[in-house]
Image (cartoon, rainbow, N blue to C red):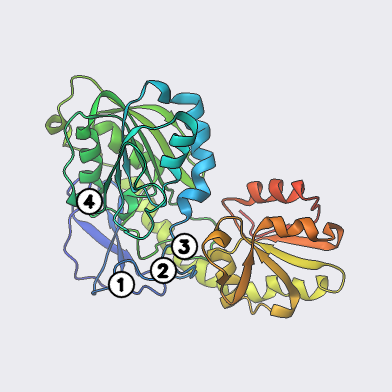
């Protein structure tokens, strides 16, 4: 398929090349690659409804229930506790405040802080909008004005990938920070796992970041890296500091020329296109093992996300084989997913755990799920995937 989109790379202003059409896109998304620096960007080709109803679809039409920041917050607070002295931080910018998981953690841990909270969705801000010190901006980042050198700390988690321009969002955050100000940034990591059955390039994401590329780009904007997460984990995590004596205009040139990286990434996208379709075809065979287990064990699927939707949609899952579906966070906001009732892990307190086999329908949170299941006495597990 050819693309008639004529766009420039958001990072280096080179021309971009069409590489992929996501499966089941509702927005007519087309993924393009910068052949110079290797940035992956998605562009819509048809009108679409903003903020559609939540969906855990395994295809590109996945739309948010806006619970991801609850899901990942524990991982981030470990970084905060070790590297950030919030006692001496007074003014905070929270880009993409969502349901307020970061703001409420701040309040519970350190009391009231002066926080500028930017969140465009009006229906999910009720539990923090009236807290002391909160200046809520109910709009997109691109639609608000921020004072220069005003904040001690900026927080941007699972938001940059939704930006109209990732460059301008990062520049805007940098301009708003004081010299020496700290910036916590986390985005999904583009990793082409061999076992992918869920579409990687979902409709709401306009940018798809690779670890090394994003690392070099934020450095070019005048940030030093105070902490960096594991480049192979699901999230790219950076704790950054605004350097002294650097004018943003002098940092505007991002001159990375990494054509080998871009070429390899293009090949990875091609392989991914083949793998995801083959993996979906093979799901029926892998899920058929439930037929053999059902007689001796009660099968509990833990994880009601996109992998579960793929299992239901492409694995020919027999509802009679499934005892229950558990999801610790999604169950707080959704009663049912893919036709199955969602339950909180606490239901296991009333179960004969020796009779239960837990199928962990997660890749990124498999270890956390297993550890929590073990606290309820569960000892029998099957973990999705092979990578």
Q: Quick one: SS at disc 4?
A: loop
Residue 315 got which mark? Answer: none
Q: Quick one: SS at disc 2?
A: loop
Q: Earlier in the sequence, mark 3 or mark 4?
A: 4
Q: Earlier in the sequence, mark 1 or mark 2?
A: 1
Q: Earlier in the sequence, mark 3 or mark 2?
A: 2
Residue positioned 43% across, 38% down in the render: 237
Residue positioned 47% across, 38% down in the render: 105
Between residues 313 and 37, which one lies in front from this camera angle?
Answer: 313
Which residue bears the numbered disc 4? 165
Q: Quick one: SS at disc 3?
A: helix
Residue 215 position, x and y percent, is 35, 36
Q: Earlier in the sequence, mark 4 or mark 1?
A: 1
Residue 242 position, x and y percent, is 27, 26
Relative to 68, is 46 on the left or the right?
left
Q: Earlier in the sequence, mark 1 or mark 3?
A: 1
Which residue bears the numbered disc 2? 60
Residue 198 position, x and y percent, is 51, 65
Residue 27 got which mark? Answer: 1
Relative to 321, is 110 on the left or the right?
left
Which residue bears the numbered disc 3? 272
Relative to 84, is 263 on the left or the right?
left
Q: Quadrant of residue 246?
A: top left
Distance in Å between CA atoms under marks 1 and 2? 9 Å
Q: Earlier in the sequence, mark 4 or mark 2?
A: 2
The reply to whether dot 3 and dot 4 touch (C-beta < 8 Å) is no
């Amino acid at each position: 398929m050819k693309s008639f989109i004529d766009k420039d790379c958001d990072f280096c202003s080179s021309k971009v090349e069409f590489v992929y059409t996501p499966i089941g896109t509702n927005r007519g998304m087309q993924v393009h690659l910068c052949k110079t620096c290797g940035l992956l960007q998605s562009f819509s080709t048809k009108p679409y409804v903003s903020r559609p109803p939540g969906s855990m679809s395994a295809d590109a039409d996945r739309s948010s229930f806006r619970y991801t920041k609850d899901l990942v917050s524990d991982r981030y607070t470990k970084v905060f506790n070790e590297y950030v002295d919030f006692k001496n931080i007074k003014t905070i910018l929270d880009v993409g405040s969502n349901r307020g998981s970061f703001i409420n953690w701040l309040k519970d841990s350190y009391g009231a802080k002066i926080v500028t909270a930017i969140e465009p969705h009006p229906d999910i801000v009720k539990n923090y909008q009236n807290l002391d010190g909160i200046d809520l901006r109910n709009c997109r980042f691109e639609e608000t004005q921020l004072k220069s050198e005003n904040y001690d700390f900026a927080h941007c988690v699972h938001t940059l990938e939704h930006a109209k321009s990732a460059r301008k969002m990062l520049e805007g955050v940098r301009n708003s920070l004081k010299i020496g100000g700290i910036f916590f940034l986390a985005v999904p990591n583009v990793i082409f796992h061999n076992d992918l059955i869920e579409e990687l390039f979902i409709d709401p994401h306009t940018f798809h970041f690779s670890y090394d590329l994003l690392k070099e780009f934020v450095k070019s904007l005048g940030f030093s890296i105070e902490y960096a997460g594991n480049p192979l984990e699901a999230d790219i995590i950076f704790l950054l500091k605004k350097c002294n004596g650097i004018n943003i205009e002098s940092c505007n040139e991002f001159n990375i020329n990494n054509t080998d990286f871009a070429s390899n990434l293009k090949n990875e996208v091609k392989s991914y296109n083949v793998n995801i379709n083959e993996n979906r075809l093979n799901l029926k065979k892998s899920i058929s093992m439930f037929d053999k287990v059902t007689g001796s064990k009660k099968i509990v699927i833990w994880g009601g996300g996109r992998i579960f939707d793929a299992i239901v949609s492409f694995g020919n899952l027999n509802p009679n084989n499934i005892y229950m579906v558990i999801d610790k966070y999604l169950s707080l906001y959704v009663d049912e997913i893919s036709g199955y009732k969602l339950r909180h892990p606490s239901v296991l307190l009333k179960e004969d755990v020796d009779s239960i086999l837990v199928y962990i329908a997660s890749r990124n949170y498999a270890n956390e799920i297993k550890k929590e299941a073990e606290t309820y006495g569960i000892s029998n597990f099957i973990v999705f995937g092979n990578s």
